[in-house]
C-alpha cells in the first residue's frame, strides 16, 4: 500500500453530481459556446483550402483549372458554404467578446464597450469593401 492514506470500506466518497452528455443543449449560451469551439475546425479547413489554392496557382494554369474543377464538386462546395457560415459565426462571437477582453482608455476615460465593438465591425466592413473592390477591379 502507498504511504499516507488508508481507505476502509466505510470511507466516504466524493459527492459528484452526474452531468449529462448533452449539458451544452440546456442553455442557448452553452450551445453558442460549443458551436464557437467547433467553428475552429472550419477555420482550419479554410486555412488548408487557401494553402491548396496557393499551391494550385503556383502549379500553373492546368493545376489551377483542376483545383477550380475540384472546388466546384458538390461536397466541397457544401463544405465551403458551411465553413463560411461557421467562420462568420466565429468572427461575430469573437467581436462580441472583444469589449470584455479589451479595455481601451482615452486619457483617463474608458471607452465604452459598444464603441469598441463598433470599431471592430467598422474595420471588418472596411476590409470587406476593399477586398470586394479588388475582386471587382480584376487586380
Image (spheres, grey):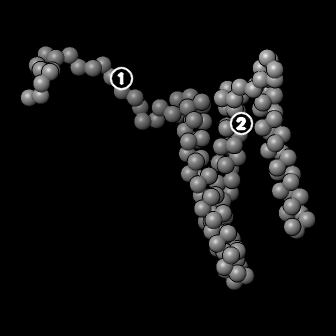
What SS does tag 2 mark?
helix
Expressed as whole percent of the image width and height from the top left, the position of residue 82 reads 65, 54
Q: Residue at x 80, y 17 (%)?
A: 109
Mark 2 closeness class: few <14, some 14–19, many ≥20 residues within 10 Å:
some
According to the image, label 2 marks what residue?
A: 95
What SS does tag 1 mark?
loop
Q: Residue at x 77, y 32 (%)?
A: 117
Judge by depth and name the residue closer to the eye, 73 or 43.
Answer: 43
| Residue at the farthest bottom position | 62
Instruction: Give the spatial CA distance, label 1 vs label 2.
Output: 35 Å
Instruction: Give left or right: position of 16 versus 5.
Output: right
Expressed as whole percent of the image width and height from the top left, the position of residue 77 reads 67, 64
According to the image, label 1 marks what residue?
A: 17
Q: Residue at x 55, y 38 (%)?
A: 34
Expressed as whole percent of the image width and height from the top left, the position of residue 1 reads 8, 29
Judge by depth and name the residue closer to the eye, 60 or 78.
Answer: 60
Amino acid at each position: 500500500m502507498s504511504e499516507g492514506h488508508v481507505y476502509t470500506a466505510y470511507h466516504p466518497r466524493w459527492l459528484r453530481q452526474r452531468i449529462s452528455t448533452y449539458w451544452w443543449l440546456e442553455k442557448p449560451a452553452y450551445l453558442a459556446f460549443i458551436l464557437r469551439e467547433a467553428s475552429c475546425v472550419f477555420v482550419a479547413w479554410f486555412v488548408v483550402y487557401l494553402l491548396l489554392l496557393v499551391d494550385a496557382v503556383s502549379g500553373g494554369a492546368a493545376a489551377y483549372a483542376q483545383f477550380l474543377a475540384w472546388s466546384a464538386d458538390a461536397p466541397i462546395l457544401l463544405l465551403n458554404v458551411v465553413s463560411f457560415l461557421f467562420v462568420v459565426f466565429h468572427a461575430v462571437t469573437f467581436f462580441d467578446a472583444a469589449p470584455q477582453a479589451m479595455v481601451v482608455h482615452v486619457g483617463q476615460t474608458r471607452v465604452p464597450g459598444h464603441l469598441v465593438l463598433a470599431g471592430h465591425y467598422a474595420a471588418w466592413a472596411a476590409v470587406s469593401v476593399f477586398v470586394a473592390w479588388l475582386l471587382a477591379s480584376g487586380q
